Structure formats: structure tokens, C-alpha cells
Image: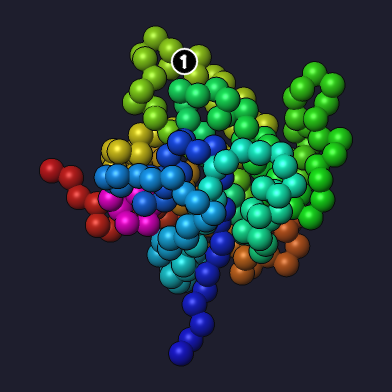
Amino acid sequence: MASLDRVKVLVLGDSGVGKSSLVHLLCQNQVLGNPSWTVGCSVDVHDYKEGTPEEKTYYIELWDVGGSVGSTSSLKSTRAVFYNSVNGIVLVHDLTNKKSSQNLYRWSLEALNKDSSPTGVIVSNGDYDREQFADSSVPLLLIGTKFDQIPENKRNDVLTRTAFLSEDFNAEEINLDCTNQRYFAAGTSNAVKLSRFFDKVVEKRYFTRDPSQMTGFTERKRFNFKSVHYD
């Protein structure tokens, strides 16, 4: 039996931001009716081929890591087992919860520095050093949830804040409502951004010997959910 071509993508963020709902939407093409807290880690798989060489199918393993934020060594060492051999990271935050956005720096640094404490990362004014992320060979994607819950008169301020996050992480951003499949409808900007991210993840795992020289595929096709239909 031929071995499966798999890639591993971490899904990180605080508890309650909607990671499980996001993963279910991506892998099952359905809205998750009764989301529950993730204890430890849960893994779901998404079949992906569009944009990859010869349109070969790759299996994207989405590792939804439990979102208890803590700085104790026991919590970090427990989660560290999930951070091995990572090909990409999806950072998820709640657009209505500014703290969940700020904690993404901590989550990403914990995953990227799993073998050592990220000493010297925080500068004197409490911000994080952007260079920590700019030099990372691991593709990152930033996803903001609960977009529907932001009042119309607050959306510009929130989107300005998320744009700075995107710049800090050197990652594209997607803002959505995980209870609405239309946010990933074929041909939308969100679907294209997701496709580009998966392309990079697959390329890093199977086609790039030197991650610092990683480039995009020469030909891309739009991301498409085959089982999503609209009237």
C-alpha cells in the first residue's frame, strides 16, 4: 500500500476563539453544531490538491491544540510533544477579544521555540521582536473569528489592528464567521488565501530543501470545497 503524503499544520490560539469550529469547517465542509473544549490535542484531516504539482492529493493534518494559556513549564512541556515536525501554523484569534490577539505572539513563539525558552524576545515596552517571525521558515496564516459579532461602527478599528498583526507575523489574514460556510466559498479572497497557505505548506514539506529559498508554485488554482453548495 502506498504511503500517504501528509503535512502537519498546527492550529493555535486561546480557548474559546473557535479553533475546533474552524477545523471542522475546513475538514468536513460543515458548521460545527456543538463545539466543545479541546483537551490536549485533536487531529482532523483535509484532502487538498489544487495548486500542487500535477494536482496530486495531499493530506493536511490540522492539529487543534488545547488553548489553555500558561507559562508553567508543565504546560509547555505537555504541549511540546505536538510541536514536532511542523510544516505550517494557523494562528486563530477572536476579533472581539483583544487579549486573544495579543496572546498569538506567545503561542507562536512557544511553538517555534519548543526546544528552548524564548528569552530576549520581549523588548522593554512589552512588545515582541518582529524579526522572530520574519525569519521563520514555517508558513503562518492568521485567522480572526467572530467577525459577525463586531458592530459595524467598530469594524474599521478592529481590521486596522489585525492588519498590524498580519504584518508582524509576515502572514496573510482571514477574518470570518465559523458558523457561515460562505466565508470560504470558491473564488472568494479567503479561499484564495487559504489555498496559497496550503501550497506553501506542501512545498515546504515535499519540494524545498532550503526553507530560506522557499517560493510559491508557478501555477495556482483557487481553493475549492467540493461539497459546499449554495442556492
Q: Is residue 118 visible?
A: yes
Residue 145 lies left or right of residue 78; in this view the side is left
Farthest-out residue, top: 153
Asked whether, in this view, residue 41 is left or right of residue 85, the answer is left
Residue 53 x, y percent position in the rendering: 51, 68
Is any atom of residue 197 visible in this view?
Answer: no
Amino acid under label 1? Asn
What quarter of the picture does the C terminus occupy? Answer: top left
On screen, residue 98 above or below 153: below
Q: Residue furthest bottom?
A: 1
Placement of 6 over or under 216, stated as above or below: below
Is 27 a magenta residue?
yes
**Magenta-span inclusion, residue 126:** no
Residue labelled with disc 1: 156
Considering only vertical position in the picture, is 18 above or below 26? Answer: above
In the rendered image, the residue lying farthest to the left is: 231
Foreground pick, 145 / 18? 18
Characterize the magenta stretch by its predominant secondary structure: helix
Please report the bounds of the magenta region as a residue range.
25-30
134 left or right, relative to 14: right
- How crowded is the residue under tag 1: few (<14 C-alpha within 10 Å), some, or many (20+)? few
Label 1 SS: helix
* Nearest the eye: 79 or 128: 79
Give whichever of 90, 167 is nearer the camera.
90
